[in-house]
Amino acid sequence: MATTTSRRSLLTLALAAPLAGTVLAGCGGDSGPGAAAGGDGATIWILTGQPVEGIRTDAIEAFNEANPDSALTVSSFQNDAFKAKIKTAIGAGEAPTIIWTWGGGGLRNYVENGQVEDLTSFFEETPAIKEQIFETAFGAATVDGKVYAVPCEDVSPIVLFYNKRVFEKVGAQPPTTWGEVMELVPVFNAAGIAPFSLGGQSRWTNMMWLEFLYDRIGGPEVFQAVFDGQPDAWSNPASIEALTQLQDLVRADGFVKGFASITADSNADQALLYTDKAAMMVHGTWTYGSMKSDGGDFVTGGHLGWMNFPPVEGGAGDPSNTVGNPSAYYALSSKATEEQKTAAKKYFAEGLNTDETTKAWISVGSVPIIKGSDSQFSSSEDAEWLQFVYDIASGAATFTQSWDQALSPTAAEALLDNIEKLFGLSITPQQFADAMNAVIGS
C-alpha cells in the first residue's frame, strides 16, 4: 500500500515526467540548498522525485536566501525510506521541525500522541494565508475541529475518463447518471469493448469506486462517521446500498475481464482505455500525463474525455463532491524549540505557497491549491484539462481524502483486503460491513 499511496500523492503527473516510475526515482540524502550551519536551526524533510523535488528545494532555497536568520536545513528521502525514518525519528523525539504528512489518519495519530503543534491560532493570526488556499484542502489537515497542518503544492482528484472514439463507434453519449452508467454496460459489451478499465490487482483502484458511490448515495457524512470512529458506521444503509450497487456492476460485467490480475503500477489499465479496449476509467488526475505521453494521439488528438463522477438517482450526495488527494501537507513538530517553530511558521507564511511555486506547479502540468491560479493556465497546451481539474477541486462542496490515507494503517489494510473480496464477489455487502466495523478506531 505504501507504494500506491505515494503514487497518488506524487504522480500528479508532471506532464514533463510522463512515466510513473520517474516521479519516484531519486536518492535520499541529508543535504540540500541553503543548509544552515550547526544543528540548532529549523529542519525540514521532503520527498524525492523530479520534477516535484526541484520545486520543493527551489522554494526552500529562495526562502533561505531571503531569511538567512531563519534558514531551514533540508533532508530528502525516497517515499518508503521516509516513512520508516519519520516513524523512528518521531518516536525518539528527534523529528524534523517541519514534518511532511499526507494528513488524514497519519496526522490524527500524530495529534493523539502530542507530536505536532496545533496551528489553528497560526491561521487565525494570518488569515490571508488560509484565504488563498482551496477550502477543500483543509479537511485532511483538521482533527477534532483544529488545524494541524498547512496544505500546500497541488491537487489530485479522482475523475471519470472516457474514450470519445468508442462512444462514437457505438453511438452513445457519456453518462450523466448512475442509471445511464448501468445502461451503457451491455451496449459496450455487445460491441466487444469493456465498459470500464480497472487495475484491480492494485486494490486501491477498486477503492475509488466505493469512495464515489458512498458519497453519491449517502453523502460525505457516511465515511466521516467511519473516520470519526462511530461504532458500526460501515453498516449505514447508504453503505450497504453502495456496496450492493458496486457488486451489481461487477455481476453485469461492467469491468474488463481479468481486472483482478491487472496492475495499475504498470499503467496497463490506462492502456486499455487509449487502445480502445475499454470505454471508461475511474482514476486519478495524475494519469493524464502518462496517457498523453504513452497514448499516441489519444490525448493530443482530442479523443480523451473527462467528467466528474455522475450522481446516483435519489442519492444524498452533492454532485460537485469529489474524492482523492486534496493537497500535500506540512505539520510542525511539537518538540521543536520556540526558535525553530518561529522559523517554520515564517516559512509557512512566506516560502511555501508563493507566486513562484504556483507557476512552477503549473509548468509541470499540475493544478496548485491556490485560488485564482487558473488565470495562468492560458499559456499551457493543457489549459482545458487544467481548468477542469481546478474547477473540480476548488468547487467541490466536499473533497474527501482517499480512504487508505484517511484511515489508520491497520484499518486501511483491512479495507483494501475486504474491497478485493467484495469485487471478487467472495463476500456480501453485509460481510464487508461487519469486517470493517471490527477495525473501526484501530
Image (tube, helix red, strand yellow):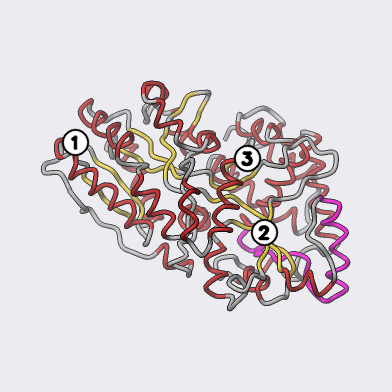
Distance Cα–Cα, label 3 vs label 1 = 37 Å
Picture quadrant of residue 93: top left
Mark 3 or mark 1: name the one nearer the start of the chain. 1
- What's the residue at 61%, 67% (across, down)? 263
Residue 119 horizontal/vertical position (percent): 39, 26
Mark 3 or mark 2: name the one nearer the start of the chain. 2
Q: Which residues are magenta?
A: 177-203
Provide the residue designation for mark 3: 396
Location of residue 196 with respect to 343 vertically, above or below: below
- What's the residue at 47%, 65% (across, down)? 15
Provide the residue designation for mark 2: 306
Location of residue 177 with respect to 202 vertically, above or below: above
Q: Secondary structure at mark 2?
A: strand
- Which sits in the foreground, 339 or 363? 363
In this view, the mark in front (3 or 1): 3
Provide the residue designation for mark 1: 70
Mark 2 or mark 1: name the one nearer the start of the chain. 1
Picture quadrant of residue 94: top left
